[in-house]
Image (cartoon, grey):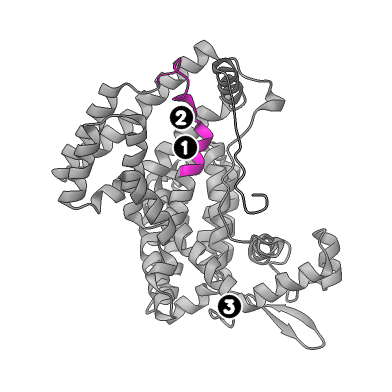
Amino acid sequence: MHNGRPTTVIFRQTGEDLSDFITDYYSKRYKAFADLNETGLLIYIPLIMEGLCRMNDDEISGIFQLSEQPTTDNLLHFYCFVLQKLDNPLIMNLFWETAMFEGFLLAQKNAGISLYSDQTIRDYLKAVAGYAAERNWTETYKVLFTFQKQTFEEVKRYVQKHISPAPDSEQIPFKWRIYREHPQICYSLSVRLLHEMCMGEYSEAEYLPSYEKMSVKYNVSVSTMRRTVYVLHHLGAVQPVNGKGTRICRIREGDGMPDLSIAPIRRNMAFFFQAFEIIMYSCEEALHITFSAISPEEKKQLKEQLRKYLALGCCEISLWRLLLTVAVGSPLQGIREIYGNIYGLFLWGYSLKPSHETEPDNKRMYRMFTEELIQALETDDIDQCAALIKQFVSKQFIFAEKYLIRHGFQQNELRLSSSISFLLSANEG
């Protein structure tokens, strides 16, 4: 805008330019597509199934209506419509990040690329709606899974026929960009320090190093380091001690409580809650593929860590160790990327662990979970491991939600923001 007058930006692109751009786009993401498709099967199908389970008859009728206009846009509207039932902005963020990376909307602008036929979309949406209306979740799952697999095979055949991969040095992996308001270095550094306090360099330390030493170590200013410790203090993870330094509040000690009157703490607690829900619906599949891929030596190290937590009385860390195992050890880059971010967001619940101990038998539940998990790992029963984790996370999610609501959180703070809801509602119309 100049002197109160709007500026018009004119963008002109020939059909040849568009075709070249699309070819270049796909060639540089060539090696990520297969991985991201497998990741999507493990992450999204459980989320879509849960969204469908929450739909009433009128909402399922809306899927039938979408099938009458079987366009690619309406296919995306279907996924948005279903995932929005989960009321989780982090899930919607992840969905759009993967959709944009895969570039299917971009491909539709090129007349030479046809990823979905109208009949395929119509049959798919009608089948999903039909089985969902009958509450036949076994067949619903089969339809979702089969469509995703067949669609990817179509895309794979097209890409292999028409597009050559760019050199390895130019390949672009999937990165999950989480939308934040006014992101600051101190928040990402806080997550790094929380990790070090739980499982890294400071896991056995009583105090953090001085601001000056940490500023050099993490290559940030002393003022940034002070802001980071300020955040951790109000999170309940550290406690300044006059004349001594910054004491680490251990989970097993239960002496750190979050200050939920601080806006950044509340925002990051909401991220923790939303990440927790993604874990609840996707952990069984993500852990199963990871435990099937890691080496016997890695499983041995995991068992040793879990036994250590039992001996120290800090079994609350067991779940974080499992998330970290997925973030590092999954054979799929997409799972590693997603669970790496989820692990970081989940660390914001650091000080909720001792708070949960006010719940009846919660500490005993952590210990029993750790013992049962070790036993399943001893027999290499991967199905049992995954099932145990799914069951445990589902129970702990309820505890976390009750705690946050009891301490003043409103559902609209934890759930889908009105701006995202409005956007999707507008698109659906």
| Position above or below: 424 against 391 | above
Residues at discs 1 and 2 in contact (Cβ within 8 Å): yes
Q: Which percent across, then down, holds residue 380?
A: 45, 45
Q: Which percent across, then down, holds residue 376?
A: 42, 52
Q: Which residue is mark 3?
A: 262
Seen as rendered, the residue at the extreme bottom is 242
Q: Which residue is mark 1?
A: 99
Q: Which residue is mark 2?
A: 104
Q: Amino acid at mark 2?
A: Phe
Q: Kindly identify which numbered label has been placed on residue 117.
A: none
102 is within the stretch colored magenta: yes
Task: Pick whichever of labels 1 and 2 is earlier in the sequence.
Answer: 1
Give the distance between the C-alpha atoms of the residues marked 2 and 3, in whole angstroms: 41 Å
Taking the image as drawn, is residue 190 in sight?
Answer: yes
Task: Pick whichever of labels 2 and 3 is earlier in the sequence.
Answer: 2
For the residue carrying disc 3, how many other residues have a C-alpha within 10 Å: few (<14), some (14-19), or many (20+)? few
Image quarter for residue 348? bottom right
Give the extent of the magenta segment.
96-114
Q: Which percent across, then down, holds residue 406?
A: 40, 80
